[in-house]
């Protein structure tokens, strides 16, 4: 696929059974899939630094799937997404800070959906909204103690719901990425989208809060920037970053350190987690959605090193709105990995962070660094 | 194993690798496993008919596992119980009515645990209580509309936590079984416990809200009453029941009907679900706990027909407190299936239900029917 005009040469993805992926930019956001809405809410006052991102399916829901690949997941309503189980369609996905406490944010989204009559119909009893959720670990990053007192609840979930729109998605230090860190620098929310030759749209939203680094310390570039759409690092800033307290550090437990791999910086943040959504407008079965989510995990693996560790609860949801006939499934899976990888890079690129948790832009890019909300 | 004195002959469980299971009654409750507490809370006023049952692990938690076998599960924090994942110990299990809305009850339990400093330690941020949960579908059974307005939330979860004790557990129309139905008669909460020859205790708690019947219509006996500890049905009452509106009926969708299988009675209750906990005081790995939970599902299969349908979210958790060295794992699994089956029978035996949802006792046993709370 090609990237933004003039930014990089067209790259052809070929191989047995794979179509050449056509000319479309990876730049974009999850709402490139028609009918999906995304809403963010955050709180950064009074010791809080956390938030919620809600993805709403179009009316009638979207076929859903999930893949849980990290060793420390915090999830809700993922069992129903097993392809053997009866519920096919998801009404919303909740991505939230607050570790397991943040699962309460889904209650607020369920209430809003139920009030709107949206959900799995259960006869005279009404509807049960289907709202799978996953959390990142951002406890304590705002400073409030006990940390559990400053975690998303139903109100912040409902606010994210109220903020949802089908327009471009704000990326950076927003929503569920508000309290995120990525190997010691600011994490955040990112996105990417592409259109395959057959017209199928594939898009991703990632909330990056990884133990591992999304930045290659040898070059200062983002591993997941597959189209090289982001600016070149400033060599002097890169050198300064690698000598600073914000550099990628050996993992606290030592794993990876002996191989020189960048890893989590903070012994006081023992848990991390990258979560997100991959979506398409193609018709997919529930089992194919599970496969689509797994391809998102492949993209995560390309974009973060190390990834899927025992301190990451890395979980990816998939949604298929079914507006278009199914095309080449292998091309779709290939693109899903690409857009998720790029969404991870986009999150770290756009995250401005805070004084005590600076962003990639300020550290490595300098004056041209992006601002929050640029998507 | 033998059952209550004089009630049935001793039964020897033998086979390759299986120890003979020793003399101990199946009668008992989950708290036979030392250190476990159980608390119930319910609300049956103002159109409500639902509740919560909380199982608390001893200080330091219990090794946990889960098995999800029904086609319509509603769950929370089950992914972390995958044996590949890092969290080994569970602080509490929440079983609740309210369908997916009821998952909010776990928030109240998490808050109570966090306030007590109980949970997975996460450095300066404190603790994250590990509280997996599963729901039954009881929406609308109390009459409130919309049904979602009358579902357990954090307050009812916290009340169940406050009510927890290590004493005998109340069985019947209590806790998460308050709004339960089982193939058109009252469901409820039941329990069973046994001690193996090597001194290992195995116990179960079941919340029975099954589409299928726990009663064999040919005899009026409970399928799961493995020790024949419950009274013989009154022949006249049995005949009257089988001619009444409360008899086991063909499944609404017709599946099973052609084979004469008893099944769900209520077209207005399209979803059901049996959930529960199997526990032991033996040392088990997390993977062995998953196996223990699966054996609980085998017990459920013996006690309910049909079981594990697409309208049941049948889920069983397992807890191992690790007070005793591991014994014969096959004997433990055998006993887990037996105690779970008996717990299902016990639930239906003790459920008194309501005027519009009578219990097994009133229908089939007559004057000697049990009362709520007899455990």
Image: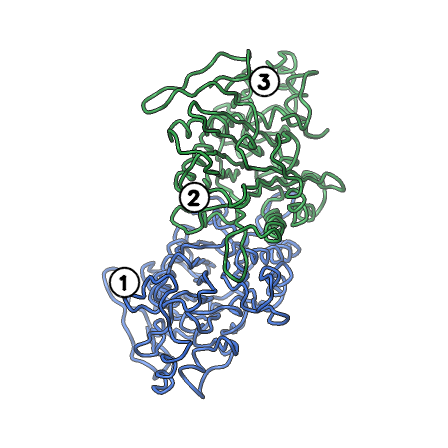
Chain colours: A green, B blue
Outermost residue toward the right?
A46
* Side of B234 where B14 appears, left or right: left
Residue bearing mark 2? B84
Chain letter for the residue marked with disc 3 in the picture: A
Tell me if I can see residue B279 in this picture. Answer: no
Residue shown at the point (60%, 61%) measured from the top left: B146
Which mark is in front, 1 or 2? 2
Chain letter for the residue marked with disc 2 in the picture: B
Q: Position of residue A323 (x, y in %)?
A: 47, 36
Residue bearing mark 3? A230
Q: Which mark is residue B18?
A: 1
Quadrant of residue B267 within the rendered picture: bottom left
Please check whether the numbered discs 1 and 3 fall on a single chain.
Answer: no
Q: Position of residue B84 (x, y in %)?
A: 43, 43
Q: CA distance from mark 1 to mark 2?
A: 28 Å
Which mark is in front, 2 or 3? 3
* Side of B270 where B255 appears, left or right: left
Picture layout, residue B127 above or below residue A50? below
Q: Mark 1 Cα within 10 Å, few/some/many (few <14, many 20+)? A: some
Q: Position of residue B198 (x, y in %)?
A: 36, 66
Tell me if label 2 and label 3 are in contact, CB under 8 Å. no
Q: Mark 3 Cα within 10 Å, few/some/many (few <14, many 20+)? A: some
Outermost residue toward the left?
B16
Q: CA distance from mark 2 to mark 3?
A: 36 Å
């Amino acid at each position: 696929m090609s990237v933004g005009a003039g930014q990089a040469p067209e790259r052809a993805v070929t191989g047995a059974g794979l179509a050449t992926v056509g000319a479309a930019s990876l730049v974009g956001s999850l709402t490139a899939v028609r009918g999906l809405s995304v809403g963010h809410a955050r709180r950064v006052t009074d010791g809080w630094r956390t938030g919620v991102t809600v993805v709403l399916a179009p009316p009638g829901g979207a076929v859903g799937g999930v893949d849980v690949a990290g060793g420390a997941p915090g999830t809700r309503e993922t069992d129903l997404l097993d392809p053997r189980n009866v519920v096919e369609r998801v009404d919303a996905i909740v991505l939230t800070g607050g570790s397991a406490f943040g699962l309460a944010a889904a209650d607020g989204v369920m209430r809003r959906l139920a009030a709107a009559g949206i959900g799995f119909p259960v006869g005279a009893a009404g509807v049960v909204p289907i709202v799978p959720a996953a959390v990142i670990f951002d406890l304590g990053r705002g400073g409030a103690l006990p940390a559990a007192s400053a975690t998303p609840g139903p109100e912040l979930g409902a606010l994210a719901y109220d903020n949802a729109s089908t327009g471009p998605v704000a990326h950076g230090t927003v929503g569920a990425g508000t309290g995120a860190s990525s190997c010691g620098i600011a994490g955040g929310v990112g996105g990417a989208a592409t259109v395959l030759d057959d017209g199928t749209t594939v898009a991703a939203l990632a909330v990056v809060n990884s133990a591992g680094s999304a930045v290659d310390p040898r070059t200062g570039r983002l591993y997941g920037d597959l189209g090289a759409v982001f600016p070149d690092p400033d060599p002097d800033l890169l050198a300064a970053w690698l000598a600073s307290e914000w550099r990628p550090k050996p993992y606290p437990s030592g794993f990876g350190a002996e191989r020189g791999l960048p890893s989590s910086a903070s012994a006081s943040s023992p848990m991390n987690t990258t979560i997100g959504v991959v979506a398409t407008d193609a018709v997919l079965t529930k089992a194919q959605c599970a496969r689509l989510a797994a391809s998102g995990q492949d993209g995560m693996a390309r974009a973060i090193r190390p990834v899927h560790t025992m301190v990451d609860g890395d979980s990816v949801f998939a949604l298929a709105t079914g507006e278009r006939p199914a095309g080449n499934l292998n091309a779709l899976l290939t693109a899903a990995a690409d857009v998720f990888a790029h969404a991870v890079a986009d999150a770290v690129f756009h995250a401005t962070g805070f004084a005590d948790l600076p962003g990639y832009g300020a550290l490595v890019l300098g004056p041209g660094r992006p601002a929050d909300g640029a998507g």
